[in-house]
Amino acid sequence: MRMISPIIFIFSLLLSSSHAAVQDFCVADLTAPDQSPTGYACKKPEELTVADFVFSGLGVAGNTSKSIIKAAFTVAFTEQFPGVNGLGISLGRADFAPGGVAPLHSHPGVTELVHVVRGTITAGFISSANKVYSKTLKEGDIMVLPQGLLHFVVNTGGIPAEAYFSMSSASPGIQTLDLALFGNNLPTELVAATSFLDITQIKKLKSTFHGTG
Ligand SMILES: *[C@@H]1O[C@H](CO)[C@@H](O)[C@H](O)[C@H]1NC(C)=O
């Protein structure tokens, strides 16, 4: 008999939960101002349809000829896919021409899963102990890139490659090493002092990555 009262308690919780103010989701209202860091306001639940939870933009390959990285990234983050807002998850598609690259970069606080569906890529990350974990991945392979660590991808397969990357954030940030060093107005002398690179190389890369100073 001592078991009955907890069971009744749980049952009454289940019954009452249908009236509780549980927030199942918060589809971002992109027309309202972004209230970062708390995020977007939620669209009114009565205005939502299933279309708010579907994104159809990943079916087409990105154009890999538009930049020196010979790669294109198509993403379904909160801004493109408001339905993932606040859910700690999102997805993107990466297309790599032969030799295409995702240059060394990191996503602060965010873990990434890479899933190769076509071609062969070499992916890797570098731990806080500066140990390199790198492997050539083929169709069907997935690799986890632990939160915040610098990582890269190179299409080493000689044919176009297609991969999907799932992020543990709906609005992941990105820091790209080349852009941090050469794509802003950090003075050349400070880049040289803090990186041990020579001035000529820094000026050349600033020109490539549209940096000044
Ligand atoms: C890809 O981008 C290049 C360079 O901007 C352009 O010349 C080409 O037409 C584009 N290809 C497609 C399929 O849009």
Image (cartoon, rainbow, N blue to C red):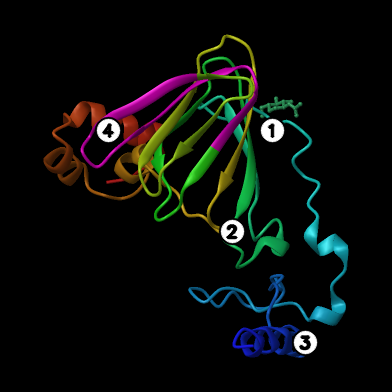
Labels 1, 4: front one: 1
> SS at mark 1?
loop
Residue annotated with mark 1: 62
Q: Quadrant of residue 1?
A: bottom right
Q: x, y percentage for residue 45?
A: 80, 79
Q: Residues within 10 Å of mark 4 (few under 14, many from 20)?
A: some
Q: Which range of residues does the magenta coloring cover?
A: 114-136
> Looking at the picture, which amino acid does disc 1 mark?
Gly
Q: Are marks 3 and 4 in contact (CB under 8 Å)?
A: no
Q: Is residue 124 left or right of residue 196?
A: right
Callout in the foreground (3, 1): 3
User: Foreground mark, 1 or 2?
Assistant: 2
Q: Nearer the viewer, residue 128 or 183?
A: 128
Kind of residue indicated by mark 2: Ala
Residue that mark 3 sits on: 15
Q: Which residue is mark 4?
A: 203
Quick check: is 134 in the magenta stretch?
yes
Residue 81: where, in percent of width, then height? 71, 57
The residue at 63%/11% (across/down) is 159
Would the CB of label 4 be found within 8 Å of ligand 1?
no
Dot placed on the residue nearer the N-terminal end, 1 or 4: 1
Q: Single out the mark in the foreground, 2 or 3.
A: 3
The magenta stretch spans residue 98: no
For the stretch drawn in magenta, what is the main secondary structure?
strand
Q: CB under 8 Å between callouts 4 and 2?
A: no
Q: Position of residue 71 (x, y in %)?
A: 58, 28
CB contact under 8 Å: marks 1 and 4? no
